Image: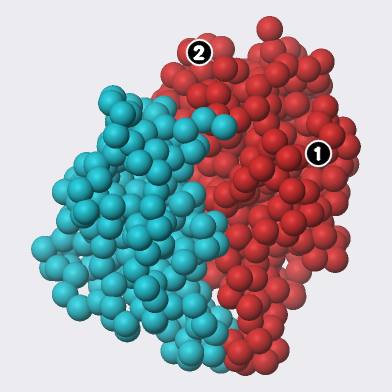
Chain colours: A cyan, B red
């Protein structure tokens, strides 16, 4: 199977046990009406994209559980026979976060959303590599998980951090000589769905600029 | 490297592909008006007969493998497109027990569906795509690109979505759900019908006697609104243009457009405008969702299969349910048209302004 070498142009990560504070939303989403509708994943994605200095272009977003908060709101509204919020429904799809990025930044380029369970971020990186190879462009690969919902303790057995995300901007490397395989530089307690991308961010922070990945 | 659609099968409210094509050509909608999900009103729904989404997927994938040139899927990449994944089973547990305690999070994710197929068939690798109603169209987009760059010889695309209370009631909350069978592109259309389906498409790098070529894929984002399309149809147009560019074809090479055509007021108006601006009335266009309903994440794969059949049968299907066409500047046929169909564009559009166009055509 084919592999490619990717330049890591920029990277960022963020996580918190419960809720990430100060995601700089007022600057990143200046329109108040828009800002009020943003999901937690959307806020984290906007923050990470900004930290990576990504203004627009092709996006690959990954999340195992994506907008579970909105899904839970819908399920509870149905259970309680209360009014179901149209905003919750429109915000419940897995491509919500990158779609808000596209709305706010007027980015009309392609968005792909990957949700491959605990290998979500690895598959997002593979998809970003494919998009970079096909287009010759810089690609934002960003993954996040926000599972800080009421009664989450009933099901959460996999993470100490209820909100977390990581991002890289990549392009195809012209020089593959120094390309490294993805090392296991996990952040303890982070959900496995994010660990491959967290590892790549950590590799970049430790001085690695080129990685090799199978498509 | 060229990409070929060599085998496919599906299961939807009309049955398998043979039954579905019969329903499409005879304008016999398989939609029902059902009270299951909504207390005070009916909803037009596309409900299929099946035990559960997992066993149905295995059944349809088995048929495709049996009819393919492969002995197994050990060198095949699986790409699944779904908008709800394992939610159907999990919401049933939640509504019954009023608690998350007995929900296995791994059964909630999109990957629940791919995991079950990987266990059964031993795929080389798998990934799941979830971009709402473009999910399996984007799975096809990635399949073509992976074959283009010679990364894989075989990619199996599965589009799968089962009906969930949350999706039916969510679309109802958005006021886009029709209480009756939908009427795409009609002046009096009143909304869409949520439906369910499984569609399986084998994409390969070799041509067989039965091949349809996957010639081009295109995508775009509207960057306009979370649920309403750009009123100038800019996103839809760019998506179709990108598919033409990828296929190295011009608009004159297209004979039929299988439209997204959900029958919502906004989609059909904008999609018709996009087709008008790009093609004028030079190409036949219609929506087979009048038969199947909107199968959400499975729709892209379902409609790619229907488009393959249209090319093979030399027969453009009629628009079911059409009485008074809203946009008279595009060519919507009320009866089947017998003709050579060289190339088809199949459109899928989704929440977030996510647009994908698949261009398939006859092999040379």
Residue in the image at 69% along x and 12% along y: B363
- Where residue B156 appears, x then y in whole percent? 69, 39
**Residue located farthest toward the left when viewing the structure as drawn:** A27
Q: Determine whether, in the image, residue B192 is placed left or right of residue A158.
A: right
Q: Position of residue A50 (x, y in %)?
A: 18, 55
Chain under numbered label 1 = B
Cα separation between marks 1 and 2: 35 Å
Marked residue nearer the N-terminal end (1 or 2): 1
Which residue is label 2 attached to?
B249
Vertical placement of residue B83 versus A3, above or below: below
Relative to B302, A65 lies left or right: left
Measured as percent of width and height from the top left, residue B332 is found at 63, 29
Name which residue lies at 32% across and 29% down: A176
* Residues tagged 1 and 2 counted as in contact (Cβ below 8 A): no
| Residue designated by label 1 | B72
Residue occupying image coordinates x 39% and y 81%: A160
Let me know if residue A108 appears in the view.
no
């Amino acid at each position: 199977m084919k592999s490619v070498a990717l330049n890591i142009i920029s990277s960022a990560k963020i996580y918190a046990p419960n809720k990430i504070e100060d995601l700089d939303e007022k600057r990143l989403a200046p329109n108040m009406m828009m800002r009020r509708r943003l999901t937690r994943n959307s806020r984290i994605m906007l923050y990470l994209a900004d930290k990576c200095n990504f203004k627009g272009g092709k996006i690959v977003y990954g999340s195992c559980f994506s907008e579970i908060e909105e899904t839970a709101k819908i399920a509870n509204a149905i259970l309680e026979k209360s009014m179901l919020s149209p905003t919750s429904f429109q915000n419940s799809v897995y491509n919500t976060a990158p779609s808000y990025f596209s709305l706010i930044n007027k980015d009309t380029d392609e968005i792909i959303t990957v949700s491959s369970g605990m290998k979500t971020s690895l598959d997002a990186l593979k998809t970003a590599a494919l998009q970079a190879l096909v287009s010759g462009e810089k690609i934002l690969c960003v993954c996040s998980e926000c599972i800080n919902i009421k009664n989450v303790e009933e099901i959460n057995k996999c993470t100490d951090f209820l909100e977390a995300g990581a991002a890289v901007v990549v392009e195809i490397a012209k020089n593959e000589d120094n390309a490294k395989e993805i090392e296991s530089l996990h952040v303890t307690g982070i959900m496995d769905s994010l660990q491959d991308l967290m590892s790549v961010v950590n590799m970049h922070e430790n001085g690695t600029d080129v990685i090799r990945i199978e498509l | 490297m060229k990409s070929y659609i060599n085998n496919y099968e599906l299961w939807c409210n009309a049955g398998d592909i043979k039954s579905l094509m019969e329903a499409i050509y005879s304008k016999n909608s398989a939609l029902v008006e059902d009270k299951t999900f909504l207390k005070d009103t009916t909803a037009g729904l596309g409900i299929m007969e099946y035990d559960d989404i997992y066993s149905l997927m295995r059944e349809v994938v088995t048929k495709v493998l049996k009819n393919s040139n492969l002995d197994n899927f050990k060198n095949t990449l699986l790409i699944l497109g779904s908008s709800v994944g394992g939610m159907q089973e999990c919401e049933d547990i939640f509504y019954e027990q009023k608690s998350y305690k007995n929900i296995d999070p791994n059964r909630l994710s999109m990957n629940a569906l791919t995991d079950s197929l990987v266990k059964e068939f031993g795929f080389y690798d798998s990934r799941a795509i979830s971009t709402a109603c473009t999910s399996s169209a984007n799975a096809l987009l990635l399949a073509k690109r992976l074959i283009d760059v010679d990364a894989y010889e075989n990619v199996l695309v599965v589009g799968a979505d089962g009906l969930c209370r949350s999706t039916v009631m969510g679309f109802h909350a958005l006021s886009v759900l029709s209480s009756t069978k939908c009427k795409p592109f009609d002046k009096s259309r009143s909304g869409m019908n949520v439906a369910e389906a499984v569609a399986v498409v084998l994409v390969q790098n070799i041509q067989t006697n039965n091949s349809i070529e996957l010639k081009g894929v295109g995508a775009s984002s509207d960057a306009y609104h979370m649920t309403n399309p750009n009123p100038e149809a800019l996103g839809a147009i760019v998506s179709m243009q990108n598919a033409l560019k990828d296929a190295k074809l011009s608009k004159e090479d297209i004979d039929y457009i299988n439209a997204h055509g959900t029958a919502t007021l906004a989609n059909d108006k904008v999609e018709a405008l996009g087709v008008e601006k790009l093609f004028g009335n030079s190409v036949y266009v219609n929506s087979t969702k009048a038969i199947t309903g909107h199968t959400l994440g499975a729709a892209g794969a379902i409609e790619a299969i229907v488009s393959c059949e249209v090319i093979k049968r030399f027969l453009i299907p009629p628009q079911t349910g059409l009485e008074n066409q809203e946009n008279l500047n595009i060519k919507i046929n009320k009866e089947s048209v017998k003709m050579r169909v060289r190339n088809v564009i199949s459109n899928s559009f989704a929440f977030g302004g996510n647009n994908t166009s698949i261009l398939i055509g006859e092999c040379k």
